[in-house]
Amino acid sequence: MANQAQTGGKQRAAKEPKFIFGSLFVDAPVVTEPEEERKVVVAGMTEARVKKAYPEGYIRKAAAVCRGDYRTLIKCSLWFLAAALVFVLVLLVAEPFFEDYVIGQGFVFTGGLGIGFTPSGEFDSISEQTARLYWEVYEPLLCMLAGAGVIASPFMAGLFYCAKRSYFQDFYKRSVATFFMGFRKYWWKFLVTATVGILIALAMGTSLLYHLSCDAKGADTAGSLAAVILTFIFGAPLLLLPMTMMSLFTSYELSFKDTIKDAIVIIFNNPLYVILVGIASAVPLLLLTASQILSIIVVIVMFIIGFIFWALCWIAMGDRGMSKCKAYKAYFEKKKAVAHGRAVKAGKALPAGKDAPAAPATGASAPAPKKKAQPAPYQNPKKKKKKK
C-alpha cells in the first residue's frame, strides 16, 4: 500500500511544449469571405444555409468535405484541369515522340555481342544510348514538365480558394465566379512560390539524371553522386517551405512576408504532419514515371478526385499547423502573464529578460510605490487629556 501511495504521489508532471521560433509567429484570423446573395424562396424569405457536421481530425475533415461538396468542387476544378492538361500532354504524348526523335527506332540492343550493327556498319553501344536516353531525352522532358507546372501554378490559386471556402464552410454556389475570384486575389503568390518549388525539384531531378547518365557510360561518378546527395539533403527540406506557404495563402490574413515566417514556424513545430503530407503529395508524381499504363490510370484518378483532395489536404495541413502554433502562443503568453502577476503581487521586480515588463519609453527609472499611511490610534473623546 505504501508503495502504491508513493507511486501515486510521484505523478509525472506534464511535459512543457517547446515553441520553436515562436518569436517569428504572426497570429492571424481566417479570411472572412464575402457572402453570396441568398436565393428568395418565398416572398420575404430566403433559403436556409445549414452548417454541415464534419468529423474531428484535419485529414478526416478534408475527406468528408471532399465527399460532401464534390459536385461543387469538381465544377471549380475544371479550369485548373484545363491548365494541368498541358502537363499531362507533355508527359504522355510529347515524351514518346521526343524519344523517337532523339534516339531513333533503329537501335538494336545487342551491342558488344558482335551481331548488332547500325546501317553505317558501326556497333551499337547500349551504355552510350542509355546515357543519351537519360541526358538527351529525360532531362529536356523534365525541363518541359517544369515549364508546364509553372504555367499551371497561377490556376492553383482558384482551386485552393474554392477548397478553402468549402473546408471552412463559406457558402458559395457560383463556381466559376468563385474560382476566378481566388485567381485574381492570389495568382501572383502561387506563381512565385510554386516557381521556387519547381526550380528546387528541377535541380534535384537534374542532378539525379546526370548521375545516372555518367553511371551508364562508366564514367567517374564521385562528383555526380556528391551533387545528388547535396541537392537532396538541402532540396527536400526546402520544398516544405513553398508547400506550407501555399497551404496558408487563401486561408489566413497574412502578408507574403508574414506567410514565410508562419510557414517556417509551422514546419519546425509540426514537422511530422508536414512531411507526411508532402510525401503523400509526391507519390502520384513518382507513379507517373513507372509505366505508360499506370501513368494513364494516375492521370484519370487525379482528374476525377485527386486534385480536389490534394488541395483540401494542404488546406487542412495549414489549419492544423496554425491551430497548434496559436495554442502554443496562448500558453506561453498566459504563463508570462501569471509570472508577471505573481511578481507584482510579491512586490518584487522581474529579472531582466524576455519575461520582464517593458521599460518606460523615456528611460527614467520607475517611481517607487507609495507606502500606505498608518491609521491614527483610536482615542476616546470623553477622556480628558492629561496635563503636562
Image (cartoon, rainbow, N blue to C red):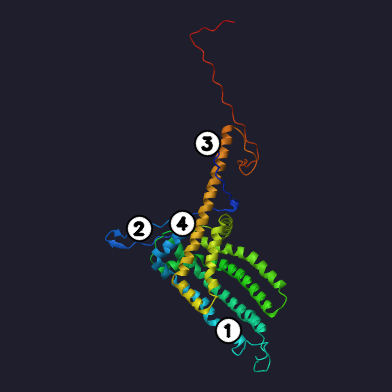
Q: Position of residue 47 (x, y in %)?
A: 32, 60
> Which amino acid type is shown beneath numbered disc 2?
Val
Label 4 CA crowd tier, 10 Å (few <14, some 14–19, many 20+):
few
Is residue 19 placed above or below 336 in the rendered structure?
below
Q: Residue furthest front?
A: 1
The earlier-in-sequence mark between 3 and 4 is 3
Q: Which residue is mark 3?
A: 5
Q: Which residue is mark 2?
A: 50
The earlier-in-sequence mark between 1 and 4 is 4
Q: Position of residue 284 (x, y in %)?
A: 52, 71
Q: Which residue is mark 1?
A: 98
Q: Residue furthest top?
A: 387
Q: Are marks 2 and 3 in contact (CB under 8 Å)?
A: no
The earlier-in-sequence mark between 1 and 3 is 3
The quadrant in which residue 209 appears is bottom right
Q: Which residue is mark 4?
A: 57
Query: Image quadrant for the C terminus?
Result: top right
Q: Nearer the viewer, residue 96 or 178?
A: 96
Between the C-alphas of marks 1 and 4, the distance is: 46 Å
The earlier-in-sequence mark between 2 and 1 is 2
> Which amino acid type is shown beneath numbered disc 1?
Phe
The earlier-in-sequence mark between 2 and 3 is 3
Q: Are marks 1 and 3 in contact (CB under 8 Å)?
A: no
> Which amino acid type is shown beneath numbered disc 3?
Ala
Label 2 CA crowd tier, 10 Å (few <14, some 14–19, many 20+):
few
> Which amino acid type is shown beneath numbered disc 4?
Gly
Between the C-alphas of marks 2 and 1, the distance is: 53 Å
